[in-house]
Amino acid sequence: MTDRLPHEKGFHISWDQIHRDSRALAWRLDGKGPDDGNWRAIVAITRGGMAPAMIVARELDVRTVDTISVKSYSHQDQSEASVLKRPDADMMGDGTGILIIDDLVDSGKTLELVREMYPNAHFATVYAKPKGEPQVDTFITGVSQDTWIFFPWDMALQYVEPYRGV
């Protein structure tokens, strides 16, 4: 077995793909909120959850959107999760009726931390790795634990040499 760097087993996500997958997440969540099927608010886990949360909020017509800032990565190195900014406490309560969205659950440490704060919230991610799946209530696509996901906000278009050369 060969040790691979995180970028060597990469799953590249385009803007079109994150949009389609986020809309699919919205469709899966539609009518599942505790208030006659509706959600009181959406909270995006920054930064990765912001684009999916915006799309889900639009699709489900949820106008109250806030963020929680959790730092658990420095580039491609995972570290201990810590909360940098919390959403409005009065709005959040114990999380009932709140939809918390992130782009990806990896180890589950970020969602575990946020779940401790808001135990009755519904946690949804677009992508999920096996170690993190127990922390998420709803997700769209599962990926292997050793896959590194390249999101469009982390990438730039550039020329690539043809496989067989020029």
Image (spheres, rainbow, N blue to C red):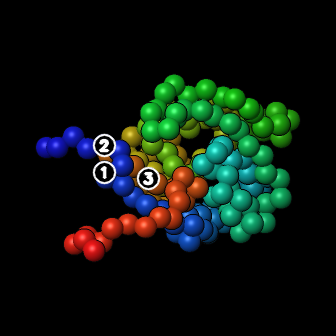
131 vs 113: above or below: below
Between residues 117 and 164, which one lies in front from this camera angle?
A: 164
Q: Closer to the observer: label 1 or label 3?
A: 1
Query: Mark 1 falls on what kind of element?
Result: helix
Q: Residue furthest front?
A: 166
Residue 52 in the image, given as x and y percentages of width and height: 63, 58
Q: Is residue 70 visible?
A: yes
Question: Mark 1 — residue?
Answer: 8
Q: Earlier in the sequence, mark 1 or mark 3?
A: 1
Q: Are marks 2 and 1 in contact (CB under 8 Å)?
A: yes
Residue 50 in the image, given as x and y percentages of width and height: 67, 52
Query: Mark 2 falls on what kind of element?
Result: loop
Q: Residues within 10 Å of mark 3 (few under 14, many from 20)?
A: some
Residue 85 in the image, given as x and y percentages of width and height: 74, 32
Question: Mark 3 — residue?
Answer: 149
Q: What amino acid type is highlighted by mark number 3?
A: Ile
Question: Mark 2 — residue?
Answer: 5
Q: Residues within 10 Å of mark 1 (few under 14, many from 20)?
A: few
